[in-house]
């Protein structure tokens, strides 16, 4: 494709690219059209206003080719700054060349984005969005995508195949992201197969880190997959009323508040 197209030509070509590939990332479009990220974001905003595509955090998706909006996509705008704070602090716990087990979800995605300047990482995940980001944006790092059944509209794999894949691996650090933390019960999720996978993540690494924004504390949760004693470090944006710190008293678990 020729570089430096005129405004309307570029937007028409951008729209055709989105229609062909179903989803695109800003950095991909910067490389494709040879313009700045600011220019690309302006193009995406204009095309969204015209009803031609749907912008997402860091890119855009086709309106005509997608059947559903993923749950993950809906959550990209929820607690964004808190998740980025957590991600930056958690990324500081990672050394170049390490092997990581990374949970699914938007907090985990922000973690991987915060790791983009690290080198030589091997990242194991069940999350398709995370795997795609590593493949397209982290050329010095490798990704291992766990097999299994893709949960519809959630963009992650679960089930016996995912568990079997994970059972043959061992990592330096596992990062888990609970759906909630319930006092007196533990780290929670609402989906049985994901609870199994999160338990396996906790058992598959030398060090375990829980990533949890303040909104998760006291939120509803159906299935326990672990407790605070099952990790070495909890990273949060803030600890509401010191509830987590109080729960950690007497445990050999560090609390990092971003």
Image: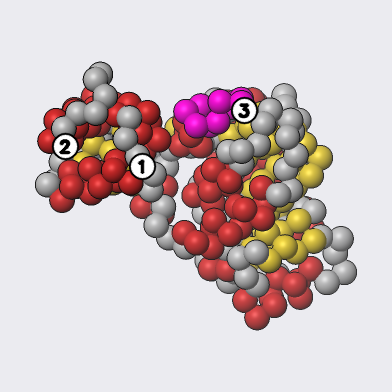
Mark with earlier residue (1, 3): 1
Residue matched to label 1: 37
Q: Is residue 65 left or right of residue 23?
A: left
What's the residue at 76%, 56% (across, down)? Answer: 233
Q: Which residues are magenta?
A: 134-144
What's the residue at 68%, 59% (across, down)? Answer: 235
Q: Is residue 149 visible?
A: no
Residue 152 lies in the magenta stretch:
no
What's the residue at 69%, 76% (across, down)? Answer: 243
Residue 62 locus on image (x, y percent): 23, 36
Q: Return the residue nearer the eye: 225 or 180.
A: 180
The answer to whether 252 is drawn above or below residue 206 in the figure is below
User: The N terminus is located in which quarter?
Assistant: top left
Q: Nearer the viewer, mark 1 or mark 3?
A: 1
Q: Would you identify the image quadrant in which residue 47 lies?
A: top left
Task: Give SS at disc 3.
Answer: loop
Label disc, if present, on residue 7 of the rendered structure: 2
Task: Give SS at disc 1.
Answer: helix
Separation of marks 2 and 3 at Cα, in angstroms: 35 Å
Q: Is residue 98 left or right of residue 218?
A: right
Please report contact status of discs 2 and 3: CB closer than 8 Å, yes or no: no
Residue 183 locus on image (x, y percent): 67, 70
Q: Nearer the viewer, mark 2 or mark 3?
A: 2
Residue matched to label 3: 141
Separation of marks 1 and 3 at Cα, in angstroms: 23 Å
Please report contact status of discs 1 and 2: CB closer than 8 Å, yes or no: no
User: The C terminus is located in which quarter?
Assistant: bottom right
Residue 205 locus on image (x, y percent): 77, 38
The answer to whether 160 is drawn above or below residue 72 in the figure is above
């Amino acid at each position: 494709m020729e570089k430096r197209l005129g405004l309307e030509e570029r937007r028409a070509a951008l729209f055709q690219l989105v229609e062909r590939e179903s989803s695109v990332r800003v950095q991909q479009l910067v490389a494709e059209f040879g313009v700045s990220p600011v220019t690309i974001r302006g193009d995406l905003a204009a095309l969204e206003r015209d009803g031609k595509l749907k912008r997402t955090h860091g890119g855009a998706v086709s309106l005509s080719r997608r059947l559903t909006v993923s749950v993950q996509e809906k959550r990209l705008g929820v607690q964004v700054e808190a998740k980025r704070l957590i991600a930056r602090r958690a990324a500081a716990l990672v050394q170049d060349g390490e092997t990581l087990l990374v949970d699914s979800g938007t907090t985990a995605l922000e973690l991987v984005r915060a790791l983009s300047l690290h080198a030589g990482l091997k990242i194991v995940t069940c999350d398709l969005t995370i795997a795609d980001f590593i493949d397209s944006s982290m050329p010095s790092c490798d990704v291992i995508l766990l097999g299994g059944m893709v949960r519809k509209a959630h963009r992650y794999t679960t089930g016996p195949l995912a568990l079997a894949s994970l059972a043959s691996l061992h990592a330096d650090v596992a990062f888990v992201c609970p759906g909630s933390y319930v006092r007196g019960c533990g780290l929670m999720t609402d989906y049985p197969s994901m609870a199994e996978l999160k338990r396996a993540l906790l058992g598959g690494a030398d060090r375990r880190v829980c990533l949890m924004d303040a909104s998760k504390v006291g939120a509803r949760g159906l299935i326990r997959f672990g407790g605070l004693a099952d990790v070495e470090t909890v990273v949060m944006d803030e600890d509401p009323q010191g509830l987590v710190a109080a729960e950690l008293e007497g445990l050999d678990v560090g609390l990092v508040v971003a």
